[in-house]
Image (cartoon, grey):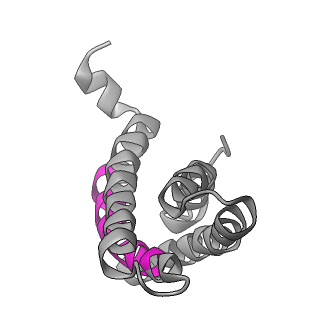
Amino acid sequence: MTIRRLLADQKVRFVLVGGFNTVLGYLTFGALTLWVFHDVRFGYLLSLLCSYAVGISVAFVLYRRLVFVVHGHVLRDLVRFVSVYAVSIGVNAAVLPVLVEVVGVPPVLAQGVVVLITTLLSFVGHRSFSFRRDEDVCDVV
């Protein structure tokens, strides 16, 4: 299979852009947790909020232009996009403290576990809601 053929597949593009965005967000989270909020009680949650702000901004542009390739309705898409991320950050904010405070997993490792859970939620949410057009027929994977 050629690279062009691979890139024609929306799921492949989603994984590539999502992978890039996940690495960016994870590195941002790690850097903030280790170097900025390291002395702050629950500083990892502040790191989480800041890394999501960066991630949402970058992801919206990349998903819109490279994965779902939609035009128009920018504000509507953005509101929907942020709402899908709100679900992800809610799941993240609920599970992360349990892993860190109850289970005793280091924050950076715990965030890696949570990222796996929220990735599937993200694809389904963005494809079926954020960038859906009325004429689209979306199958849930």
Question: Picture quarter containing residue 135?
Answer: bottom right
Membership of 64 in magenta stretch: yes
Measuring 39% from the left and 59% from the top, which residue is drawn there?
Answer: 26
Quadrant in the picture for the C terminus:
top right
* Left or right of 101 in this view: 32: left
Give the percent coordinates (x, y) of residue 56. 39, 71
Measuring 70% from the left and 73% from the top, which residue is drawn there?
Answer: 94
Q: Eyeballing the image, is 53 above or below 109?
A: below
Question: Picture quarter containing residue 84?
Answer: bottom right
Can residue 55 be seen?
no
Give the percent coordinates (x, y) of residue 63. 36, 57
Q: Eyeballing the image, is 24 above or below 51?
A: above
> Magenta-highlighted stretch: main secondary structure?
helix
Span shown in magenta: 47-66
**Farthest-out residue, bottom:** 40
Q: Eyeballing the image, is 95 above or below 124?
A: below
Quadrant in the picture for the N terminus:
top left
Given residues 60 and 138, the one toward you in this image is 60
Membership of 4 in magenta stretch: no
Give the percent coordinates (x, y) of residue 7. 31, 32
